Image (cartoon, grey):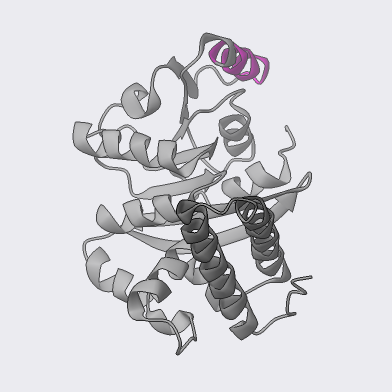
Amino acid sequence: MIKLSKRLQTIADRVSAGSRVADIGSDHALLPVYLIQSGQIPSAIAGELNAGPCDAARKQTADAGLTGQISVRQGDGLSVLQPGEADTVTIAGMGGSLMAEILEGGYHSGKLAGVQELVLQPNVGEDIVRRWLVRRGWVLTDEAIIEEDGRIYEVLRAVSVADAEIRNIVVYDLSAVPLQTMDSYVKAGWLYRMGPHLLRKPSGLLMKKWELEHQKLERIRRQVSLSDSPESREKEAALRNEMNQIKEVLACLPTDKPSFN
């Protein structure tokens, strides 16, 4: 059986047993091959936009002897999927904006019909994905944060349920951000950015991710401060405000505090 990277294994661990999986942007089809080899799922669709990765996925599938269980298809996003073909859709390794565009296209075209579970790993823009999930009636049930090869990733699992609107009120309860100095709108923004489940059970890795973000913003602020233009002053003030909010949120979380050197 193939061995997955830590990132892909985290995704695999959140796929429901027995589900039919559509892995969008499957690259070498490592995830579908592993899920079937491990007995976790019965079948899968591996979708890939470009010919090279699509050929690699076909070779990986053939080498594993799984051509009868994995359908490798070339196409854009969820266009490779027919309504009712999959119970779970996995998408990993792309930006949150593109991921949300793919999901939105699938929503409007009916490709998500019958899909009950999404397991998503955006490289950036996790808040964009979380907002899409809420807007389209999905409930975020689980979040994981991991580090691999010097990069920090978040993995999101969501389900489609009839009472999503009610359940999302609980998921995005503003008390998860224990700050009296922030208004409700700002608090909600940080829930989407940092992750409601991650904030409820904060880890050192979550702290590290946002300390690194704080450091990045400080580098940008220093560059902006070199200009005396009104636009630069306004930008610098916005950066300072965001940095202060990061410090406030992290200072309230019950875990080791960041240094903010």
Please state the horizontal and vertical placement of residue 23, each as a whole percent of the image.
48, 33
Q: Nearer the viewer, residue 44 or 183?
A: 183
Please state the horizontal and vertical placement of residue 211, each as a whole percent of the image.
69, 65
Q: Nearer the viewer, residue 216 or 85?
A: 216
> Which image quarter holds the C terminus?
bottom right
Is 137 one of the magenta-colored residues? no
- When the figure is inspected, residue 43 is found, relative to residue 62, above or below; the finding is below
Please state the horizontal and vertical placement of residue 188, each as a whole percent of the image.
38, 71
- When the figure is inspected, residue 162 is found, relative to residue 121, above or below; the finding is below
> Which image quarter holds the N terminus?
top right
Q: Nearer the viewer, residue 14 or 37?
A: 14
Q: Residue at x 62, y 14 (%)?
A: 56
Q: Residue at x 64, y 42 (%)?
A: 8
- When the figure is inspected, residue 215 is found, relative to residue 200, above or below; the finding is above
Q: Nearer the viewer, residue 14 or 259?
A: 259
Name the quadrant containing residue 248. Answer: bottom right
Q: Residue at x 49, y 49 (%)?
A: 125
Magenta residues, dominant SS class:
helix
Q: In the rendered view, does 256 fall on the left or right side of 26? A: right
Read off the magenta span: 54-65
